[in-house]
Image (cartoon, grey):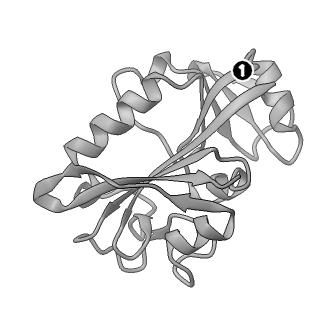
Amino acid sequence: MSFHFEGYVIVSADGMLADAHRVMPDSLKFEGDKRFFEQALDHATLIVHGRHSHEQQANSPKRKRLITTRKIKAPTVDPEMPNATLWNPAHASFAEACAFADVATGTVAIIGGPVMFDMFMDRYDTFWLSEAPHVRLPDGEACFVGVPERTPHEVLASHGMKPGAPYLLDAAHDVTVTPWRRVG
C-alpha cells in the first residue's frame, strides 16, 4: 500500500467543527471553503470519516469511502451507499478495510470527526486547517481530541507538523486554509 494522507476540517475561532448538537451549523459554511473542499475530494482516491461526518456534495455518491462504525466486525459494503465500506477499526486494520474496498494507492482524505482525525494524526502528509475566526461555537464539538485544552495549531504541531502559508478562501469573513505538513 502506498498512500498520501490528507486531513480536512474547518473550525471556529474556539476550535470547534460542530455545534453542541454535533451538527455543522450554517455559520461555519462558506462558499470558498466548500469549493476548496469539494475540489480536494474530487481528486482523492478514498475518503475516510465517522458516521456523523459527510460532505453532502453532488459527487458524494461517486466517491469511494470508508465509514467507521461499531455496529459491524468485518468490513462490509454499506447497504445505502454502494461505493462505501463500513469499517470497525477495533476489529479490522486500515489495511484490511482498504483491501476490502479495493484501494491500494492514492490520496486518502480524512474528513472527521475528532476521533477519526486522531486515529490518523501521525500519518498525515498534509492537514488542511480551514479557520473561521469570527465564528464561535460555545459547547461545540472540538475538531481534535485535546481541544479546547490546546489549540488546533498546538495539536498539529505536537504531531510533527508545521504550518505553511495560509490561503484566503473568503475575504468577507477572513476564512483561510493553512496546509500543515509533516516535518522531515
Count of all numbered marks drawn on residues in the image? 1
> Which sits in the foreground, 123 or 111?
123
Instruction: Report which quarter residue 85 is drawn in.
Output: top right
Name the amino acid, label 1: Thr
Q: Tag 1: Cα neighbours inside 10 Å, few (<14), some, or many (≥20)?
A: few
Residue 60 position in % (x across, y down)? 44, 25
Hey, which residue is sitting farthest bottom in the picture? 149
Hey, which residue is sitting farthest front in the picture? 184
Residue 11 position in % (x across, y down)? 39, 62
Question: Looking at the image, is 101 positioned above or below residue 150?
Answer: above
Element at label 1: strand
Residue 64 position in % (x across, y down)? 59, 21
Viewed as shown, does residue 179 lie left or right of 115? left
> Which sits in the foreground, 34 or 54?
34
> Which sits in the foreground, 116 or 167?
167
Q: What residue lies at 27% left-to-right and 70% top-to-bottom?
A: 133
Residue 116 position in % (x across, y down)? 65, 52
Question: Looking at the image, is 83 positioned above or below residue 142?
Answer: above
Viewed as shown, does residue 157 lie left or right of 25? right
Q: What residue lies at 30% left-to-right and 40% top-to-bottom?
A: 34
Instruction: Report which quarter residue 19 is drawn in.
Output: bottom left
Viewed as shown, does residue 184 lie left or right of 22? right
Location of the N terminus by quadrant is: top right
> Which sits in the foreground, 71 or 154?
154
Q: What residue lies at 38% left-to-right and 38% top-to-bottom?
A: 37
Question: Looking at the image, is 24 positioned above or below residue 48?
Answer: below
Hey, which residue is sitting farthest left in the picture? 172
Q: Which residue is mark 1?
A: 105
